[in-house]
Image: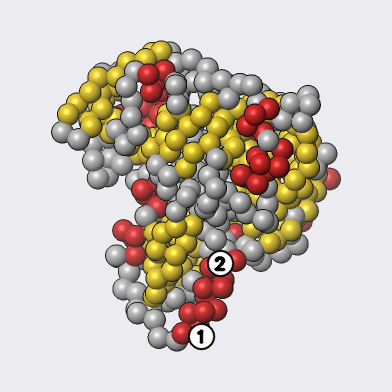
Amino acid sequence: MFGSSKTEKIISLLLFMALFGSCTIFRQKHEYFINEALETNLQLNDSITINGIFDTGSSLFCIDSLIVNKLKVKNYFFHNISGVGVSSKKAMIVTDTLKVTVANNHYTSSITTVTDIKRFAGRKLDAILGNMMFSENMVFVSSEQNSLEIIKDSSAINFSEYKKLPYKYINGKLIIDAKIDIDNNLSFNGKFLLDTGFNGQLYLNKNLQDKFNIESKIKKKAYYCSTTNGIGGKSEGFLFSAKSIRFAAFKLDKIAADCTKDTTGAFARNKDFDGMIGHGILKKFDVIFDFRNQVVYLKPGKEFTKLSARPKVGFSFVDRTDLNKGFIVNSIVKESNAEKAGLRLNDEIVVFNGARVENEGVDFIKEINTQKIVKLIVKRGTEFVNITFKKSSLY
């Protein structure tokens, strides 16, 4: 329940500035990654221990709808929010002050978004820690540990080892300048959102695609369709390998790129930025986010020069063993061997190479990225279907 229309208008304005919507938490659309997103345990109101992700692509604190059921919230209202995808979604906005403890650091959230995080991120994720929560902090992300550390004393850091990358804070987003080389014939400068919640490398929005007619100029590409990438639901686009990306005096080659074909949604035609640089790029560095001074410090890690392998799986999925017995297929590449073998969106994978996935957990995720032959049993409605295919490059 919410009483003050004036206060609601103010909060609505804040929500508009902070349009929630990390693109694809835990994965790229064409290849499943092994839980590489920056997870951390946290406590809510000193009583509930939950699992959250550090997401610079979101500004507000967000919790799953199952978690809010454990809280006795008194003040709330409903508001439409959007993200990657073609639709918006009505979400509960809690205006009670919640206490959030992260790594023994105490924060409060007076505006908390409540939505079905587990629907697109899986059973393990309960909350999203947006960048506004750390507005007075420095946050260190280790390339080797893939861990999050809140820096209390920066005097021990040798900043001379890092390259300084300023960003602009626009409508709740961290925006940097970068140059993209699509191939030898097409290059452009643009403004890109730094998004640790997007586990891919590079995402280009529809405005950029239209401006440079990227789709017609890419010879090798793979089209996909997804159902639950994020808040916005259904999404379509194509995947390809971009020649390079340049920012802060760094140049990285052979970039896994994703270009949306969506004409609506928070990221399709956003005027503040041309696309996203995700955790797939940032994990190549030790990163320090200095939110107070709006600067990111970057130091190459051990995998800085490692090139991205061409994707081969051809579909992605979300772990919903909390509700069902398997993993739900939520994105599939058209004309991939997976699709040709009969795999469909919303299929529930219950068996992989003879083992039930509800028992295998993360081992299933590891194996599907390493095995050459994929053998699945999926549940489709009331039927069980056998799917077998050989992995091959998608483009």
Question: What amino acid type should be assigned to the residue bearing mark 2?
Answer: Phe
Does 269 sit left or right of 169 as displayed?
left
Q: On screen, 40 above or below 377?
A: below
Horizontal side of residue 13 vs 357, given as left or right = right
At 63% from the left and 38% from the top, the residue drawn is 202
Instruction: Assess disc 1: are there few (<14), some (14-19) or many (≥20) residues with their C-alpha within 10 Å of its C-alpha.
Output: few
Look at the image and tell me in which quarter the C terminus lies.
top right
Horizontal arrangement in the rendering, residue 208 relative to residue 2 (left or right): right
Between 201 and 216, which is closer to the camera in this rendering?
A: 216
**Within the image, what quadrant is residue 299 found in?**
top right
Circle 2 crowding by C-alpha within 10 Å: few under 14, some 14–19, many from 20: some
User: Relative to 138, is 309 on the left or the right?
Assistant: left
| Residue that appears at 53% across and 68% down | 15
Residue 286 rendering spot, x and y as whole percentages: 68, 41
Quadrant hosting residue 387: top left
Q: Which residue occupies the extreme left position in the image?
A: 382
Q: How is the image coloured?
A: secondary structure
Q: Earlier in the sequence, mark 2 or mark 1?
A: 1
- Element at label 1: helix
> Which residue does the image show at 65% across and 40% down from the upper left?
209
* Label disc, if present, on residue 128 of the rendered structure: none
Check disc 2 and report the residue beneath it. Answer: 16
In which quadrant of the rendered image does the N terminus lie?
bottom left
Report, in whole angstroms, how far the alpha carbon at label 2 lies from the one at label 1: 15 Å
Q: 194 or 139: nearer the eye? A: 194
Q: Is residue 311 above or below residue 52?
A: above
Q: Where residue 320 sits in the image (x, y, percent)?
A: 31, 41
Q: Secondary structure at mark 2?
A: helix
Give the residue type that dot 1 points to.
Answer: Lys
Residue 6 is tagged as 1
Q: Is residue 270 visible?
A: yes
Residue at (52% x, 20% y) in the render: 394
